[in-house]
Image: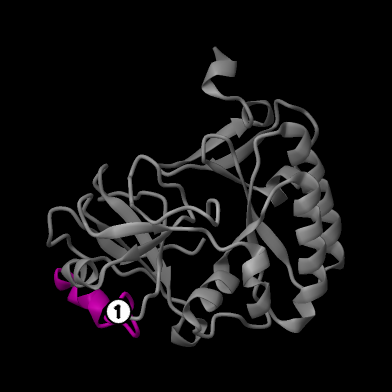
């Protein structure tokens, strides 16, 4: 289900979000549109939240949304969509499944009182996870230590951990982001995740965050062949694009 909302403010847009985070020591900083990546967390000051909502009564009337920021609940950075201004901060939040799994997208003007939050690591969120997930979480944390990567959460586990609202259910996935810049480490990570997923009580899902901040689903990498010319879908802040596997870990300097 999609809700189309006419823009009533020059620097904001809102509609339902189609269904489908940095070093813990990071200081809070005003959200910089040039530095944001998908899955980054945001915190809006209550006044900024209310300013955004005033132009969109259809969103303000949704369950939980009006008081979202007042309760200290975060939003998440999403990919830009048609109607978003280039200097706006594109954001979203999902409502708990008991409210219909509604996903709401909106944006803040660039000068709004919105700050970037540190990511939530799997280590921190583990205490919120169901008991039956704990063994595979422990194995994933060990894998992260081996590869010197701290996996961070998004999806249902993130939202229940950050809000205390009931997002997790029997069909929930364990969604993780792995920031990785080394092709060999990425290959090992994908192989291990593929094996773990086959034995896990919870479906493992998520993305590898590439050196340029774009994301590629690890399952797609696992299913592709070893040909470096094979293509995969990559999600950036502005679009979904196709890249060859050989291009995933190239930086602009290495391509010149």
The answer to whether residue 174 is visible is: no
* Residue 162 rendering spot, x and y as whole percentages: 50, 74
User: Residue at the location (39% across, 56% down)?
Assistant: 28
Q: Residue 50: which quarter of the image?
A: bottom left
Q: Residue 63: which quarter of the image?
A: bottom left
Magenta stretch?
Answer: 54-70
User: Residue at the location (74% across, 40% down)?
Assistant: 186
Quarter of the image where the C terminus is located: top right
Along the line of sight, which residue is nearer the eye, 171 or 107? 107
Q: Is residue 69 magenta?
A: yes
Along the line of sight, which residue is nearer the eye, 141 or 226? 141
Q: Sort mark 1 into few (<14), some (14-19) or many (20+) by Cα contacts within 10 Å.
A: some
User: Residue at the location (75% across, 72% down)?
Assistant: 202
Drawn side of residue 224 relative to residue 92, left or right? right
* Residue 196 rendering spot, x and y as whole percentages: 84, 60
Check the image and report above or below for 181 versus 121.
above
* Disc 1, SS: loop
Drawn side of residue 226 relative to residue 175, left or right? right
* Residue 10 rendering spot, x and y as whole percentages: 12, 54
The answer to whether residue 211 is visible is: yes
* Residue 224 rendering spot, x and y as whole percentages: 75, 40
Residue bearing mark 1? 70
Check the image and report above or below for 188 versus 65.
above
Q: Is residue 161 magenta?
A: no
User: Residue at the location (24% across, 78% down)?
Assistant: 60
Quarter of the image where the N terminus is located: bottom left
């Amino acid at each position: 289900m999609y809700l189309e909302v006419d823009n009533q403010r020059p620097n904001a847009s809102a509609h339902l979000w189609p269904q489908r985070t940095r070093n813990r020591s990071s200081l809070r900083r005003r959200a910089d549109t040039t530095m944001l990546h998908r899955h980054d967390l945001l915190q809006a000051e209550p006044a900024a939240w209310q300013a955004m909502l005033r132009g969109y009564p259809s969103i303000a009337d949704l369950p939980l949304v009006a008081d979202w920021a007042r309760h200290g609940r975060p939003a998440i950075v999403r990919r830009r969509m048609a109607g978003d201004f280039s200097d706006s901060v594109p954001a979203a939040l999902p409502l708990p499944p008991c409210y219909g799994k509604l996903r709401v997208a909106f944006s803040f003007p660039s000068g709004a009182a919105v700050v970037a939050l540190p990511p939530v690591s799997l280590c921190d969120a583990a205490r919120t996870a169901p008991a039956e997930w704990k063994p595979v979480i422990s194995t994933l944390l060990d894998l992260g230590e081996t590869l010197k990567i701290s996996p961070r959460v998004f999806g249902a586990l993130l939202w229940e951990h950050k809000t205390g609202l009931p997002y997790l259910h029997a069909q929930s996935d364990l969604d993780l982001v792995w920031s990785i810049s080394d092709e060999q480490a990425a290959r090992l990570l994908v192989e291990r995740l593929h094996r773990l997923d086959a034995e896990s009580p919870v479906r493992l899902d998520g993305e590898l965050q590439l050196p340029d901040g774009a994301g590629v689903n690890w399952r797609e990498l696992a299913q592709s062949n070893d040909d470096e010319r094979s293509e995969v879908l990559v999600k950036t802040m502005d679009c979904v694009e196709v890249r060859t596997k050989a291009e995933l870990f190239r930086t602009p300097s290495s391509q010149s």
